[in-house]
Amino acid sequence: MKNQVEKTHYSDKELEEFKALIIEKLDVARKNFAVLRETIMQSTSNDTADTSPTFKVLEEGASTLSKEEAVKLAERQQKFIQHLEAALMRIENKTYGICRETGKLIPADRLRAVPHATLSIEAKGN
């Protein structure tokens, strides 16, 4: 019986699977970012949309908070997009899925859940 050799990288087929997942998440993230950016831009303008009596009554107190929250969410979304784009670069370089601390392969299940992960659970816990 042979000793099983530990995988050191993902196959091209596996990388293509991860790439498709990342591209799908990237498309959604970019759309979400665009919506948030539009929300922020509209909340800073003084057009007639913000004078609607219904919205004025219902959202008077929440308008400042929602703009601040939208800015925070947009920043987080932009950071997420950058992480996903970096993950695509790692796929192109064939370094995707390799833990930057241990040098070992990050389990595929973790990468499916967090496709931009650069640390294994073990390394993240330290």
Image: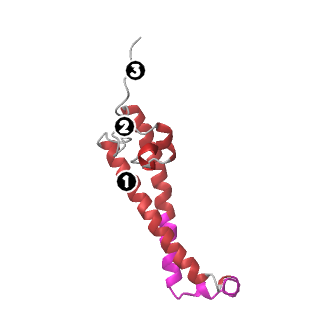
Q: How far is disc 3 from disc 2 in space, using C-alphas?
A: 15 Å
72, above or below 82, in the image: below
- Residue at image position (44%, 41%) is 18
Give residue 85's mark.
1
Give residue 4's mark.
3
Say whether residue 38 is magenta.
yes
Give residue 104's mark.
2
Q: Residue furthest left?
A: 93
User: Which of the marked residues, 1 or 2, is nearer the chain's N terminus?
Assistant: 1
Region in magenta: 33-58
Say whether residue 43 is magenta.
yes
| Whether label 1 touches label 2, CB < 8 Å | no
Question: In this image, 115 relative to 94: left or right?
Answer: right
Name which quarter of the figure residue 91 lies in.
top left
Query: Which amino acid is tagged 3?
Result: Gln
Q: Residues within 10 Å of mark 3 (few under 14, many from 20)?
A: few
- Residue at image position (35%, 52%) is 86
Q: Tell me residue 17's x, y (percent).
A: 45, 38
User: Which of the marked residues, 3 or 2, is nearer the chain's N terminus?
Assistant: 3
Question: In this image, 53 relative to 93: left or right?
Answer: right
Frontmost residue, 41 versus 92: 92
46, above or below 70, in the image: below
